Image (cartoon, rainbow, N blue to C red):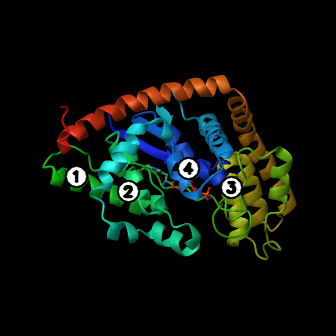
Amino acid sequence: MQTVLSGIRPTGNLHLGNYFGAVKNFVKMQENNNCYFFIADYHSLTTHPKPEDLQENVRKVLSEYIACGLDPEKSTIYIQSDMPQVAELYLLLGMNAYVGELERTTTFKEKVRKQPENVNAGLLTYAVLMAADILIHNAHKVPVGKDQEQHLEMTRKFAQRFNRIYEVDYFNIPEPYNFGEKLVKVPGLDGSGKMGKSEGNAISLIDEPKVIRKKVMKAVTDAGPAEQNSTKPEPVQNLFSLMELVSNKDTISYFNDKYNACEIRYGDLKKQLAEDIIVFTTPIRERILDIYNNSEYLNKIMKIGKEKAIESGSKTISEVRKIIGFKPF
Ligand code: ADP
Ligand code: TRP
């Protein structure tokens, strides 16, 4: 069985894009892999969150992922900062990571440009910490979005370098996890591009029905088709693409037929789409709230995750220390 690992940023409020583009695949991934999922709270310190927000963010995001189907019985779900071994491996890997290559990382260069007032060393060594996250469990595969591909490439480099320097074949060289099918792109409601938190066009899993109705009713459309069977322009296609994700086949063909016959009423389509999104998100929203409000359950899960993660991490660290040459006196 392969070990697959993914880090999750503690930024909460998953939207439909995150769900259909990533989390749904994570849930499936658990079935035939040895999965580790952790909340990357050490990484989040690069932006200096307030102490009172730190744990709150972690609890929120944990509740969301578990409500979506990450299963503490099938996978190891833990908090990065619960595992000191990761900090130790980060220190050790850092000795063989070169400032030049870290400075050339795209994400680092972008931060330097965007927040020149806070270019901390944690940002510079972000990729080293991410490599430690992955190598601490000697993962074979990592599901990564576009923005994280370079970090995985650096992890591969650090792992190969370690193996070469110490003349061992210790670390697996981790590869991107391939979901096998075409990745869905979930469109936003503003007529162009994809749904995203920062784009302000997202429907969150935690949104109340009335919020969802309001957002969908405001979605961009056009004046309607002028000719029968015409191609749908982007804003309209986007609404149909969302329907593909949440509505049943009959509903989709009903509105397609209406569109093709130039009889479509976008108001009706939006009303139906909003209700179908609500049917889809309501059970998830209820689970999120149940889990979030059940501290006892969350604490129990985090304790189990921590123990499993530490067991795996301690093994790696003691082997790595031996390879490097640390010996007990
Ligand atoms: P955001 O900042 O909008 O929450 P992220 O970039 O943090 O989104 O997304 C995390 C992951 O969720 C991405 O790697 C991608 O797999 C998935 N994702 C986000 N938005 C979409 C989308 N609109 N369509 C498909 N997948 C998405
Ligand atoms: N950097 C990742 C992100 O921003 C989160 C992350 C941290 C991660 N460590 C990881 C992802 C290890 C995969 C593997 O989304």
For the residue pair 259 and 150, the one nearer the viewer reads as 150
Q: Nearer the viewer, mark 3 or mark 1?
A: 1
Residue 210 lies, in percent from the top left, at 86, 48
User: Disc 3 to disc 2, how far (Cα)?
Assistant: 31 Å
Q: Report whether residue 116 is seen.
A: yes
Asked if ligand 2 lies within 8 A of label 4, the reply is: yes
Q: Which residue is mark 3?
A: 242
The residue at which mark 4 appears reads as 9
* Front: mark 2 or 1: 1
Relative to residue 75, is residue 324 drawn left or right?
Answer: left
x then y, percent, for residue 3:
35, 38
Kindly indicate whether the residue at mark 4 contacts the one at mark 2 (C-beta within 8 angstroms): no
Q: Position of residue 294 (x, y in %)?
A: 69, 26
**How far apart are the two marked residues, 4 and 3, measured between alpha carbons?**
25 Å
At mark 4, the secondary structure is loop
Answer yes or no: disc 2 within 8 Å of ligand 2. yes
Judge from the rendering whether residue 237 lies leftward or rightward of residue 106; answer left or right. Answer: right
| Residue nearest the viewer, comparing 37 with 83 | 83
Label 1 CB less than 8 angstroms from ligand 2? no
The residue that label 2 is drawn on is 152
Q: Which residue is mark 1?
A: 162
- The picture quadrant where one finds residue 195 is bottom right
